[in-house]
Amino acid sequence: MTLPRIGVTLGDPGGVGPEVALNSLLHSPDIANAAWILFGDSRLIGAEARRLGLSPSPAPWSPDAPPRGGLFLNDIPAPGAGSVRGRDDRANGEAAFRFFDAAVAAAREGRLEGLVTAPVSKTGWAMAGLPWRGHTEFLEHLYPGAVMSFWSGPLKVALLSHHLPLREALGKVRKEALLALLRTLNRSLSGLAGAPSEFLVAGLNPHAGEAGLLGIEEREEIGPAVAAACREGIRAAGPFPPDTVFLRARERKEAMVVAMYHDQGLIAFKLEAFASGVNVTLGLPFVRTSPDHGTAFDIAGRGVADPRSMTEALNLALRLASGRA
């Protein structure tokens, strides 16, 4: 079997991305089970490795060479990046996007089977003049319908809307959008060994609307979308009260909660699996994972960042790229 090629981006150089990426890769027992390609500035990587007492020694990446296990480097110069740490910075935001953009281009060209992205700053991207709020929004503009989901051992969650103000997110709760999401989830996960196969759909309102007494979205939008999905053979159920649906799904490997907006899904998920959860973008022709935390500017450069979520992101990317969840 050909080894998968998995790109790893450094994230924002002013945050903990370079630290958790290097620590996770260089301590991984799976380093020989894939071609792991770092997308970043060799100067930044060398400086971070020295600070951490690591010796990565990645070989230059040749995209056309047969993949072999180990660590490789796609050197992307980013002048000015890394001089500011612990806060948002235009040069760091621009560098983080350049690393990510190059990795996505390689994946779109079929040169990568998977992509793991270290955290970026949305403010840093905005300071660099970029119109996207983050990784998923950039991918969504290339692949409309891309889904933000979060995976852990006990709980898996998919989001109907991503990084939107709550007023805008509520307007996205429509039958057509939810049905499209359920179709994408079913298509992306079907045939993937160990992946969720049942979608438990959360309501929007308290008690899932209480038969219309506490809101009509369940009756007019969410319920009809679930019914339509079931008629297509998709294993969907709901809407369930939002305060109990996560308990229903917890510890059930076949179940994934479909949340109506970002915080409805992420509060429960991060309470359960903040240190080990993984962000997975579904609906792409390649695998994309990332840790479920941010840049952690408050601890950047101190060598104390917890690499577990990044390690889980690498592990899951390898499993998904190999056809197993």
Image (cartoon, rainbow, N blue to C red):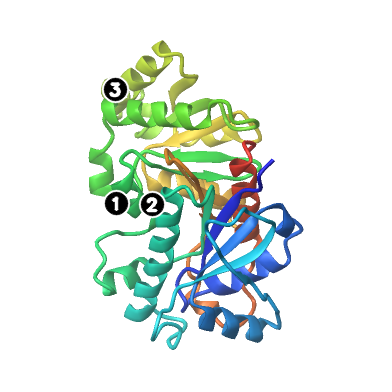
256 above or below 287?
Answer: above
The residue beneath circle 1 is: 164
- In this view, the residue farthest toward the front is 65
Looking at marks 2 and 3 on the same chain, the residue that comes earlier in the sequence is marked by 2
* Residue 114, image x, y percentages: 53, 50
Q: Secondary structure at mark 3?
A: loop
Residue at 67%, 75% (x, y): give it: 56
**Which of the 4 image quadrants contains residue 240?**
top left
Residues at marks 3 and 1, CA–CA distance in whole angstroms: 26 Å
Neighbor class of circle 2 (other Cα within 10 Å; few <14, some 14-19, many 20+) is many
Q: Which mark is residue 198?
A: none
Please state which amino acid type lies under the numbered disc 3.
Gly
Residue 183 in view of the camera: yes
* Residue 250, image x, y percentages: 61, 36
- In this view, the residue farthest toward the right is 29
Residues at marks 2 and 3, CA–CA distance in whole angstroms: 34 Å
Please state which amino acid type lies under the numbered disc 2.
Thr
Q: Which mark is residue 212?
A: 3
Marks 2 and 3 close (CB-CB < 8 Å):
no
Q: Nearer the viewer, mark 2 or mark 1?
A: 2
* Residue 286, image x, y percentages: 48, 44
Q: Nearer the viewer, mark 3 or mark 1?
A: 1
Residue 276 in view of the camera: no
Residue at 59%, 31% (x, y): give it: 192
**Which of the 4 image quadrants contains residue 205?**
top left
Left or right of residue 53, residue 314 in this image: left
Residues at marks 2 and 1, CA–CA distance in whole angstroms: 12 Å
